[in-house]
Image (tube, grey):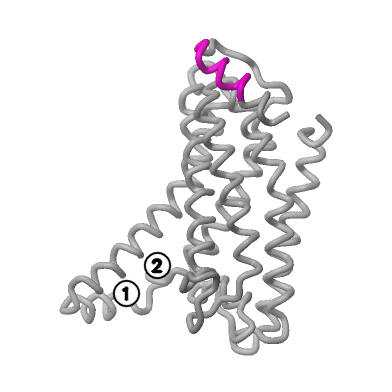
Amino acid sequence: MLLYRKSTLAVLLALIFFSFFGTLTASAWMFPKNYDWRYRVISNLLSPRDNPSHYWMAASGLALTGLLMLPFAGYLRRHLGVIAPRTANIGAGTFTAGIIALICACFVVPQHTHDVLGVRRLHELLGRSAAGFLAMGMLCSCWCAWKGRGRNRFAAQLFWIWSLVTLLPLVGIFFSESLLLLTRLEPSWATPIHSALRHSVFWHLGFWEWTGAVAVFLFLCAAVFLTPRRATLPYVDPFDCAVTSLYDNLAT
């Protein structure tokens, strides 16, 4: 398909770069207060309260980024499905779910005062869901690359690069969130932890959000430029073939 050609996907990557990093950088530059990406979350740029004049720019760029990312879910399933069809299908599904949650988060105003559709902090819920589903899709892709690393040199390269860009932000976010949870469960530990880490960027969620965004972009770049033009088919379990056939029939 034309949509899955490397040249087409390379153009989509360029558009993703400008729609995400370009619009958010412009919005941050015009932010009413000093926006430091190491300490401020991306949601501040989407908030009418924090960024009243240009929140629409950040929201539009982020929503467009999600739309441009959708073809990559099918591309990953197409290439990784020859190695582990079931895992590739799960990865493509969760990656798509993460993109949809990301797009939805752009249309929900970040605020903590009123419930939206009966849910308090719906924007945060959608944002965390997007991050979680995207991470699951990336981990499934890493597993597929690991499974095919012995038979395909491209899979081996992808595994190490994908693992690096996937696990590093996940470990950082897990560490940061664990410390935050610990301060809530043990208030007596809050002061020492805050004193030790208050000047560290690793304590702030904003740093890991931006790191994760860069990681997703690098993940997609590796998927496009390090995969062969045609996927080579190793031995595939018959049940996996049936799953792939069923998935394709449902998709059509």
Residue 31 horizontal side relative to residue 168, left or right: right
Q: Eyeballing the image, is 33 above or below 214?
A: below
Q: Amino acid at mark 2?
A: Phe
* Local SS, label 2: helix
Residue at position x 72%, y 53% in the image: 67
Mark pair 1, 2: CA separation: 8 Å
**Where's the C terminus, which quadrant?**
top right
Q: Eyeballing the image, is 135 above or below 78?
A: below
Residue at position x 63%, y 19% in the image: 245
Residue linked to disc 2: 202
* Local SS, label 1: helix
Whether tag 1 and tag 2 are in contact, CB under 8 A, the answer is yes
Q: Residue 43, located in which quarter of the rendered image?
A: bottom right
Residue 108 location, x and y as percent? 61, 71
Farthest front residue in view: 118
Q: Residue 48, located in which quarter of the rendered image?
A: bottom right
Q: Eyeballing the image, is 3 above or below 100?
A: above
| Magenta span dominant secondary structure | helix
Residue at position x 43%, y 51% in the image: 168
Residue 185 location, x and y as percent? 21, 71
Residue 203 horizontal side relative to residue 192, left or right: right
Q: Amino acid at mark 1?
A: Leu
Which residues fall within the magenta stretch? 237-246
Q: How many marks?
A: 2
Q: Residue 93, located in which quarter of the rendered image?
A: top right
In terms of sequence position, does the residue under pointer 1 or pointer 2 come before the other? 1
Residue 109 location, x and y as percent? 60, 75
Asked if the stretch drawn in magenta spans residue 242, the answer is yes
Could you classify mark 1 by the number of other residues whose Cα lies within 10 Å: few (under 14), some (14-19), or many (20 or more)?
A: few
- Give 105 or 165, whichever is nearer the viewer: 105
Residue linked to disc 1: 197
Could you classify mark 2 by the number of other residues whose Cα lies within 10 Å: few (under 14), some (14-19), or many (20 or more)?
A: some
